[in-house]
Structures are given as structure tokens and as C-alpha cells.
Image (spheres, rainbow, N blue to C red):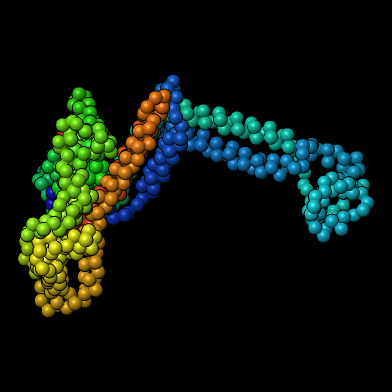
Amino acid sequence: MIVPMKKVSMVVQAKDKDSALDSLRELGLVHLENFRCSSPKVEAVSAELNRVASAILMLDEFKPKKDIPAASLDGRQAVDRILGLKEEIQTCQDHLASLSRQIADLEKWGDFEPEDFKFLAQKGWHVRIYTAYGNQVENIPQDNVVVMHKEKNSVVFAHVTRSPASLEFEEFVPPAKSLGALKAEAADLLKRIDELKEELKQCCALKPSLKQYQAELESELEYQVAKANILEEGSLAAITGYIPADQVERLTEWARRHSVALAVANPGEDDAVPTLVRNPRWLQMIEPVFDFLGTVPGYRELNVSFFFFVFLVIFFAMIIGDAAYGAVFFVGGLLATGYSAVKKRKAPLLGQLSAVLGLATMVWGALNGSWFGSPELIRGTFLEKLVVKQFTEGIAVYTPTGELYRLLTGQDVLKLFCFVLALIQLTIAQVWNFLRELADRSLKALAQLGWIAVNFGLFYLVLSMVMYFDLDGVFATGGLISQTSIILILGGLGLVFLFGSQEGNFVKGLLGGLKDLLPTALDTVSAFGDIISYIRLFAVALAGAEIAASFNEMAGGLLKGNSFVLGILVLLLGHTLNFVLACLGVLVHGIRLNMLEFSGRLGIEWSGFSYKPFHNPFKSSAASAEGK
């Protein structure tokens, strides 16, 4: 459930605000309200945090050596050291880039000593080198000119005079250093860069110090932000925030002991209330998924963890589709859980989730006879008896009179299963909406009944248009089901028009429904697309099965004779690739159905932010910040 929150305001004398804040931090229960205020201290700590992040990112580019000695610098010294090396490397690289451009420009001129030009000038011979292009060639003087290089459209020549003179051609200006000197300098720079990088490798031993320093700065930043957001008026200071309703008594006791004036109220409609989700122990394994996605329901939205978990398990099993792949997840989850038990640690939620998802995939794969994409592997074994023939061979559909209507292939049965699954999940969302509106005694509940009717009407259309599976033909109803589906769609839309915008005044609600006529029609098209969208479960699974079968076929001819090892390698690489693609398919498609189609029907925008109480991260306390 989403834990009810209370808004709290604490008032202390301005001179005591620091001590009150310190004490509140030790309590670790209040999520402080952030008014986006800042201070010089906040900016300074933020800047230092950026420096630490830059230093850590720099070290991530290097693989540490095993024989690196323990670090002897503290966090700040480590940052200065690493960023100093980084800056020197950047300076060397910039200089090297400049030298490279100079060397590239001089390559065509060859190697020479620039001092020679000065020596000749001292002797009374002034030498300047020019390049003439196109028609300029005709204007080259005939006297005191030595042609050095001639091409089709250009001429390079030297103009030698006894006194300084200038010509209207592109002049080559001799560099301060010779080509050889520039190359030697570039080589020295490369050597210096290698030395600096080697020093950075040695700095990898400073990572623990950097991480600790980063954690300290993050804690300090949290404190300084909290301090900057204290509201002051005269000699009084106010601290506001949010706390789980079941923790108010603890906060009240704290306020009494510290002589803090405390006011507790329900959050207002415009308040940005943090979200704290508490699930039963067995359901907490879905939380790593939400953490990975970075999604949090709004405080006034719904907690869909249960249905999200149930349908994710189903979607995962269908998309992965292979019992052997499922076994990998199952065994991996068991090993992670078992290792934690041996180390007497709390079982990792991700390991538990992996075991459940793997087990579900093994069951689904076994029912479809898919083990590494090869039915041959289980032929003649007990696993073959677990296969549901309707999923592999299809099913014959007969009318009530016993007449054969159609032979559905195994793929048709799976498609039908996808659409039934769509109808179930989307109807659950609408029923949930109906119950919520009914609890509020709102006429909008009738609009939700309308959407449920639309779902069932559209389900008939989807089967007819996508699978060419006419329920009238199956049950020999003479068009009754098609007529009923049209009545369900039109009647459902009628309920939506009449009651979808009801807020108290029936006439105003009716006018609001008419105003929303076009959006409602578009929502109907969207609902039709939502049901069809579930076919992705079949399509992605089919693609994975075909890829697995293709690699099996490729390796089949190699598993004999001297190419046996190559065949094993093809199987290993092929199924590893397919395994990774299947996992990506779950992220792209399986999670999408929960996050968009299902959650969208419930009006969930995942617009919330997590409840993060102001606390001291370096203090170990039995009273956790989540009030567990």
C-alpha cells in the first residue's frame, strides 16, 4: 500500500535551529520539504561533489593493478591529486594536438633548421618562400627566384634578395623549431602522458577514499539544503516536511523532549507529498524492478505492485518462452539466495525475483515443449508428457452442431491466449476504477462500467479482424454475438458520455461529456490498440524461438567429426545472444504492457518521488527511516 502521510511543521527559536536540525537528523523520520532555496555553502558542497564525481569517472577509465599499495591520502587530497593529473594530461594532449598540426603542415617541406634563415639574413641574404597558384604563376619574378617545387596548378619558389623584400604571394613562414625538433617534442609529450596515466592507475587504490568522501559530501549537502530551506521570521524558525502517519507519535515525543512546537495536518491538494510504498514481504521482490525503472507512483495514485508482479511473471515467462533459459534464471536466483544464507545476510530481492521468474518460465516452456528451442531434446523423456498439445499442434474448433468450424494452429492458440490475457488485465484496471468511484459515491462509476462493456465489445472485433476468428461462427449464433458487441461498444460509450464528466451537477456533467466527445472517441481507438498490443507477447517469443532453432540448425551439421568443438561454440554463442535478446524483449515489451497499457487505464502517471527522510547515513539505528 501507499502509506498515508502527514504534513508536519516544527517551530523553534532561530538561535536553536541548528541544534534542532541536528536532532531531527538523528531521529531520521521526517522528509523535509524542499523550497528550492540555496546558499553559498550548498553551492560549495555541490561543486566539491562534482569534483569528486569527475575524479571517480577518471579512475573508471583505468583497470587497477593487483599490486597497487594501499592509499595514504584522504578524500580531498585524493581528489586534488587525481584532478591535477587529469589537468596535466589534458594540457599535454592539447599541446600534442597543436604539435601534430604543425608537423602535418611541415611534412611537405621536409626537415630543415629555421636558424639557417636567420644565419643567411645575418650574411646579407634574405630568403623568403612563396607559393603561387593558377594565374599567379605568370607574375613570378624572373630574377632572384629559385623554383623549389612545381605542380599542375601551383609553384613553390624561393625569393633571394640582398635586402628585405616582400611579394604578393602566399608566404611560408618558417617555424620556430625544426620538423625533427617538433617530432622529438611530440615523442616526449607522449611519453609524459603515458607516465601520467600510469600514475592514475596507481591512484585506483584511492577509490575507497573517494567513495567515502563522496558519501560524506552527499550527507553534508543534504544537511546544508535542509538548513537553507528553514523558514525564518524574526526570532522564530520553521521546519516543514512529511512523515508516515504511523510515526507521528514518535515525532510528537521527540518534539516534547526538545521543546519544539509541532503542528500535524493532512497534506493539501497542492502539496508535493513524497510516496512511501510498503508491500508485504513476499511482494517486495518487485521493488528492484521499480528501482531499475526509476518509477514511483504519485502519492495520490495507486499502488499496482501486486498486479504488476503477477502479470510481469506471466509476460516474462511468455516472452522468454524457453524452459532451459528459465532454468538459468531459476538456478541463478537460488544460488544468490543460498549464498546470502551462508553469509547470514538478508536474501537479495533480485535473487528471489529471478528464481520466481525462472520457475514460471520453466513451467511455460515445459508446457510448450521448448528446451533450447529444440523439441528433439525431450523426445522420449518424461518432459514430453508435460507438453500441452494444443500449444504445439493446435486445436479443432467445432460448432454446437458438431460441424468443424476451423483448425487452429498452435500459434493461433497462443495468439488467442494473448488476447484473453489482454481482456483480463485491462478489465481488472476498469473494475478497479469502478470500485474506487463507487467508494466515492460518484456517478463516474457508471462510466467505468461503460469502459468494461467497450472492452468486451472490442475483444470480439480484435478476434474477428486480427485472427479471423468469428465467435458467431463458432457458436452458430447467427450474428447475435456481433450485434451484442456493437451494442456493448455503443452502449458503453453512451455511459461514458453521460457519466464520464460528472462532478455533482448532472447537466454540467452531461455538457462536459459532450465536450469530450472527440477525446472519448479517440480513447476508444486507443483501447482497441491496447488489446492488439498484447500480440507482442506472441511475436517476441516466436522471434526468439526461430533464432534458437536457426542456431540449432547451423550447429547441427558441425556436431560430427572434427568440427564438434566449432558446433558447440556456435550453440553457446547463439543461445547466449538469443538469451540476451529475450531479456531485452522483456524490458521493452513485457514492462511496457504494465507501465503503459495497464497503468494508463488506471490513470497512473508515475509522477511521484520517493519518501527520503532527513537522516544521518552513518548512524546505524534500529528505527529505520521507513518506519519498518
Q: Position of residue 406 (x, y in %)?
A: 17, 56
Q: Residue at x 18, y 53 (%)?
A: 407
Q: Position of residue 344 (x, y in %)?
A: 19, 25
Q: Quadrant of residue 423?
A: bottom left
Q: Quadrant of residue 624?
A: top left
Placement of 6 over or under 22, stated as above or below:
below
Placement of 350 over or under 244, stated as above or below:
above
Q: Position of residue 260 (x, y in %)?
A: 16, 48
Q: Residue at x 35, y 33 (%)?
A: 556
Question: Can residue 222 be spotted in the picture?
Answer: no
Question: Can residue 377 be spotted in the picture?
Answer: yes
Placement of 463 over or under 296, stated as above or below:
below
Q: Residue at x 47, y 28 (%)?
A: 201
Placement of 293 over or under 445, stated as above or below:
above
Of residue 128 and residue 467, the one placed in the foreground of this image is 467
Q: Residue at x 73, y 41 (%)?
A: 107
